[in-house]
């Protein structure tokens, strides 16, 4: 019995074939760093900690994609179709003509069947989203076609993934996000309304948030028209403002042991709607970016195994508390 709605296998179920993301750095920056919204960025951010070595700004996109495919081929020899993942910084933060040129360049690679665009909620507008919707409906690249599992794909797959991080405005302010939650909700709603697959990222353990505050976020997340979510436990990256804040006020942070996090995320799952895909629930930045690795060097596959085991031990599942009516779906005050 599958006790939570894992994103692993989503593409295989939908298209009959496994798709692999290859990360690319298209040289974007971020309005929270260049002074447009703020300077210094979000207090936890060191973008270098979050993307692989083959994706480097300045390298031609085609080369990054080729190298990414080579990188993944070692593990997934039979994978033939890839999604170009615009991950570094804010990948809609440029005038539309530049965005078009970058996305369409990635989509010209013969093994790329779609794009995944990671961005901030305040870096989209109606014009950009309309273009992405038209792209996904086959109205932009007229002669474009690929094959997945022997079937013709006439339009690229397009997913937009927003960094939301917290549903609490006080937290967003404290971590210097430079946007509030209403902006995130609007972006998600406008994206999903255009039938674009929409994902979001959240961090668990941000300063000032108690476990109850994090659990309360589940009903807000449930109310968003999201296809998928990713969660990460907060990791304090060396040299960031967050590192200084943690040193000054450690009592403001909930920190998790590995076992405690598995248990806590099980609590989260019980409150998340069952149809929401869980793409990731934890992750480790490379050890060179952090001062300590309290969980040891645990691999993702082991984390997944621990979560599945805990769900079984507790005989529970995603959405369990919604079914029994223990959790209110009407979350209003944050
Ligand atoms: S929005 Fe993203 S890239 Fe920009 S500072 Fe925050 S975490 Fe870093």
Image (spheres, rainbow, N blue to C red):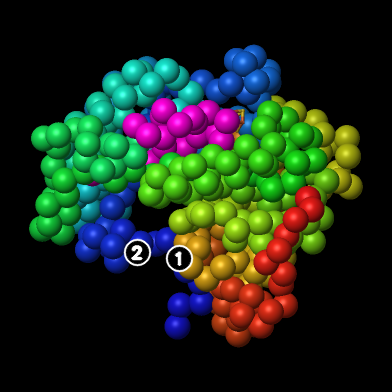
What residue sits 66% from the left and 77% below the top?
Answer: 321
Measured from the top left, where is residue 298 in percent x and y?
A: 55, 57
- Tell me if label 1 and label 2 are in contact, CB under 8 Å: yes
Q: Nearer the viewer, residue 248 or 110?
A: 110
Verify whether residue 126 appears in magenta. Answer: yes
Q: Is residue 195 left or right of residue 251?
A: left
Measured from the top left, where is residue 145 in percent x and y?
A: 13, 42
Is residue 164 visible to us here? yes
* Callout 1: CB less than 8 Å from ligand 1: no
Residues in magenta? 113-131
What residue sits 47% from the left and 62% below the top?
Answer: 277
Q: Quadrant of residue 326?
A: bottom right
Verify whether residue 114 appears in magenta. Answer: yes
Considering only vertical position in the picture, is 171 above or below 150?
above
Q: Nearer the viewer, residue 30 or 255?
A: 30
Measured from the top left, where is residue 21 in percent x and y?
A: 34, 45
Q: Is residue 7 left or right of residue 148?
A: right
Identify the secondary structure beneath mark 1: loop
What residue sits 63% from the left and 32% below the top?
Answer: 45
Identify the secondary structure beneath mark 2: loop
Measured from the top left, where is residue 186 in percent x and y?
A: 58, 41
In which quadrant of the rendered image does the N terminus lie? bottom left
Considering only vertical position in the picture, is 331 above or below 193?
below
Q: Quadrant of residue 158?
A: top left
Residue position marked by numbered label 2 in the rendering: 9
Q: CA distance from mark 1 to mark 2?
A: 8 Å
What residue sits 29% from the left and 46% below the top?
Answer: 157
**Within-10-Å neighbours for mark 1: few <14, some 14–19, many 20+:** some
Q: Quadrant of ligand 1?
A: top right
Residue position marked by numbered label 1 in the rendering: 6
Is residue 49 visible to us here? no
């Amino acid at each position: 019995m599958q006790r939570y709605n894992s994103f692993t296998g989503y593409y295989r179920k939908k298209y009959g074939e496994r798709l692999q993301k290859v990360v690319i750095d298209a040289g974007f920056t971020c309005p929270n760093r260049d002074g447009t919204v703020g300077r210094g960025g979000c207090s936890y951010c060191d973008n270098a900690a979050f993307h692989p070595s083959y994706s480097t700004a300045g390298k031609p996109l085609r080369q990054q994609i080729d190298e990414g495919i080579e990188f993944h081929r070692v593990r997934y020899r039979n994978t033939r179709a890839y999604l170009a993942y615009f991950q570094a910084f804010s990948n809609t933060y440029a005038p539309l003509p530049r965005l078009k040129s970058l996305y369409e360049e990635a989509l010209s690679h013969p093994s790329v069947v779609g794009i995944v665009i990671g961005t901030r909620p305040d870096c989209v507008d109606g014009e950009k989203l309309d273009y992405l919707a038209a792209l996904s409906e086959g109205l932009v690249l007229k002669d474009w076609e690929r094959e997945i599992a022997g079937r013709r794909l006439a339009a690229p797959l397009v997913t937009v993934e927003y960094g939301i991080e917290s549903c609490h405005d006080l937290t967003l302010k404290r971590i210097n996000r430079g946007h509030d939650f209403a902006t995130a909700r609007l972006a998600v709603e406008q994206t999903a309304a255009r039938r674009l697959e929409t994902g979001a990222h959240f961090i668990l353990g941000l300063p000032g948030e108690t476990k109850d505050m994090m659990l309360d976020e589940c009903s807000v997340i449930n109310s968003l028209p999201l296809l998928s979510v990713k969660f990460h436990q907060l990791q304090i990256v060396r040299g960031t403002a967050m590192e200084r804040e943690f040193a000054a006020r450690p009592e403001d942070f909930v920190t998790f042991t590995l076992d405690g996090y598995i248990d806590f995320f099980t609590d989260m799952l019980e409150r998340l709607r069952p149809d929401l895909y869980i793409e990731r629930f934890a992750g480790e930045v490379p050890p060179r970016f952090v001062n300590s690795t309290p969980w040891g060097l645990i691999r993702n596959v082991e984390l997944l195994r621990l979560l599945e085991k805990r769900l079984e031990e507790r005989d529970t599942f995603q959405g369990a508390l919604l079914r029994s009516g223990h959790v209110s779906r009407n979350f209003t005050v944050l």
